[in-house]
Image: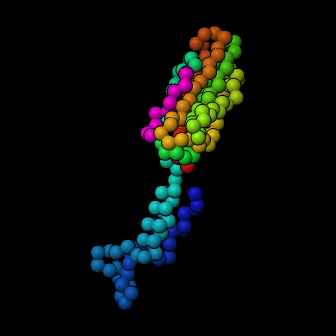
Amino acid sequence: MGSVAPVPWNTPVIQLDPQTSKPLPGFTMGKDFGNWMFTSLVQQIANAPTVYPSVTLTAQSASIGTTPIPLPSLATGTYRVTTYARITTADAVSSSLTITITWTDGAIACSLSGAAMTGNTTSTVQSNTALVQIDAATPISYSVTYASNTPAAMKYKLIVLVEAV
């Protein structure tokens, strides 16, 4: 995304009559300000990535099988997938959490896993961002592999976000 052109502070917001320097009837927007508003700003907004509703899970204490992220039918293209996980309750002994993202690119199933989170403290955090190229109308999915020495003792939260870029 490019930068937004500076606001044309030295030009009138309202178009002035060139002979009287008074506002024209109906308070017509000035040309320079209108150009700034409708080209620079609108173009910046049009070029912004589309952010889709995210998955937010809390108080999780088990593995999660491959689950499609609830998205509209997506076009073939490049998407940014960001995951965030934090241990919210540590296990008394040890635990591990691994997040995997899966998608289809050129009819080939692809996957990407983050490193196993083994810190076993409530300050153990992992955030990953990946660019994925998907086929039209195929899901982007997530899964979580959970291991805890004291069954269901470790709890975590997970956020998964998808953006069209």
Left or right: residue 75 versus residue 124 is left
Residue 57 on image: x %, y %: 51, 27
Q: Residue at x 62, y 21 (%)?
A: 145
Front-lying residue, 30 or 158: 158
Span highlighted in magenta in the image: 64-73
Front-lying residue, 71 or 146: 71
State the residue lying farthest toward the front.
107
Q: Residue at x 63, y 9 (%)?
A: 150
The quadrant holding residue 119 is top right
Q: Is residue 21 above or below residue 164?
A: below
Locate the N terminus and report the quarter of the image it occupies: bottom right
Q: Residue at x 63, y 40 (%)?
A: 130
Residue 96 on image: x %, y %: 67, 20
State the residue lying farthest toward the bottom.
19
Residue 41 on image: x %, y %: 48, 62
Q: Residue at x 64, y 14 (%)?
A: 148
Q: Can I make out residue 159 in this image?
A: no
Q: Can I make out residue 61 in this image?
A: yes
Q: Is residue 29 above or below residue 47?
A: below
Left or right: residue 71 versus residue 127 is left
Magenta stretch encompasses residue 68: yes
Front-lying residue, 6 or 75: 75
The quadrant holding residue 125 is top right
Q: Is residue 58 above or below residue 152?
A: below
Front-lying residue, 128 or 32: 128
The quadrant holding residue 60 is top right
